[in-house]
Amino acid sequence: MSDKAYKNILLVRTDRIGDVILSLSAAALLKDIYPGCRITFLAREYTAPLIALSKSVDAVINDHPNLNARGLAKILKTHDFDLAVLLHPTGRLAWALRLAGVPVRIGTAYRSYSLLFNRRVKQHRKFSLKHELEHNLDLVRSGLGIESYSEKKYLPEISVTGELKEQITKKLSGKIDLSQPFIVIHPGSGGSARDWPIQKFADVIDRIQNSEFRIQKIKVAVTLGPGEERIKEKLRAYLKTQPAWVSGLSLPELAAFLSQAKLMVANSTGPLHIATAVTTKVIGLYCPMIPCHPKRWGPYGPGHSTLIPPVELCRKCTDRKCPEYDCMDKVTVEEVFSKINQSINENINRE
């Protein structure tokens, strides 16, 4: 066990959706280590409503990136935190915690500003094939001097209320009947890795809607994030069938929608991790770059699956200079449809 029972803890994760979802397990771990403690998250305003759906988080503070370290420190100081863990540190955030006078500050040891942490953990992530969620748990345990003190499996988790489900059912009325089974296809991504070709997503959608799934009345819903209308137009050029188009949802609404799906098929992207956090099974399509590899960024937990091109791993995509370009084309429609068929049949057998 650690040397002190901390009561007022700050977790800091101000990057993207998937990163935040994979950090929530650190809050659950801290709740188990220090029963009754209060966990606050410092996060981007965009992801804050999603974090608020976690039962392990008591409060969220929105990080205003236009605030300098001193301005942020002034806000944090009013909360009187006794422990802070920077799960994804930056110099500005490290200085803010130091200036706020947080007594115990946990962070990685290999940054130019690591001296601002008084609990430094030797941890490299960029080219690691250990899962990001496990890196987060390790940072907490090592920073507190705790060995893996239980065999409990920590998974991504957020809770969707019945009220939120009713809200999304009404909002999507006329587009899709959520009382009927549906599969979600999410063809977009945040642009951090190579994506599966749009034409192949279209082929999979058509194949689902022309297969035996039609007899089972399983519908396809295509989800689109902000700024992804161009993807809709590209898909439409290839499609022979008509899916339901779902866009314009807030992150909590997207979580409520995904929680009712039978399955999600997606590139490596934040909504994929939202699906895992609401216990919807996922098929993830991943490129072979080590920083983006599914061993680090794949859907975490039982029952999910991933597909990756059958090529050598690489550290950085060189586009057309690569002899395997475009490697994502090597993941076939047959492979993806087979995974979908397997997952749906397993789902039916469990029911």
Image (cartoon, rainbow, N blue to C red):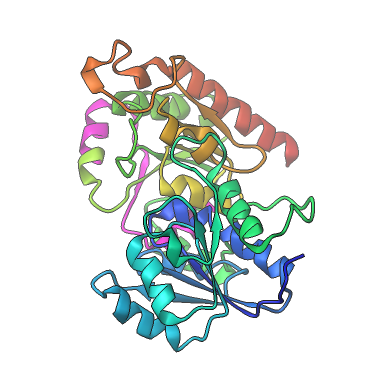
Q: Is residue 30 magenta?
A: no
| x 33%, y 28%: residue | 316
Image quarter where the C terminus lies is: top right
Where does residue 241 sit, x and y in percent of width and height? 34, 30
Where does residue 4 sit, x and y in percent of width and height? 71, 75
**Is residue 179 shown left or right of residue 153?**
left
Question: Residue reaching furthest front?
Answer: 115
Where does residue 339 sit, x and y in percent of width and height? 56, 25
**Is residue 199 shown left or right of residue 108?**
left
Image quarter where the N terminus lies is: bottom right
| x 38%, y 57%: residue | 15
| x 48%, y 55%: residue | 257
* Res 300 → quadrant: top right
Question: Is residue 149 shown above or below 126?
Answer: below
Q: Is residue 238 magenta?
A: yes
**Is residue 10 shown left or right of residue 311?**
right
311 or 233, nearer to the observer: 311
215 or 200, nearer to the observer: 200
| x 40%, y 53%: residue | 111
309 or 278, nearer to the observer: 309
Question: Residue reaching furthest bottom?
Answer: 78
Q: Is residue 171 visible?
A: yes
Number of marks in picture: 0
User: Which span is picked out in magenta?
Assistant: 232-260
Question: Is residue 286 shown above or below 184?
Answer: above
134 or 203, nearer to the observer: 134
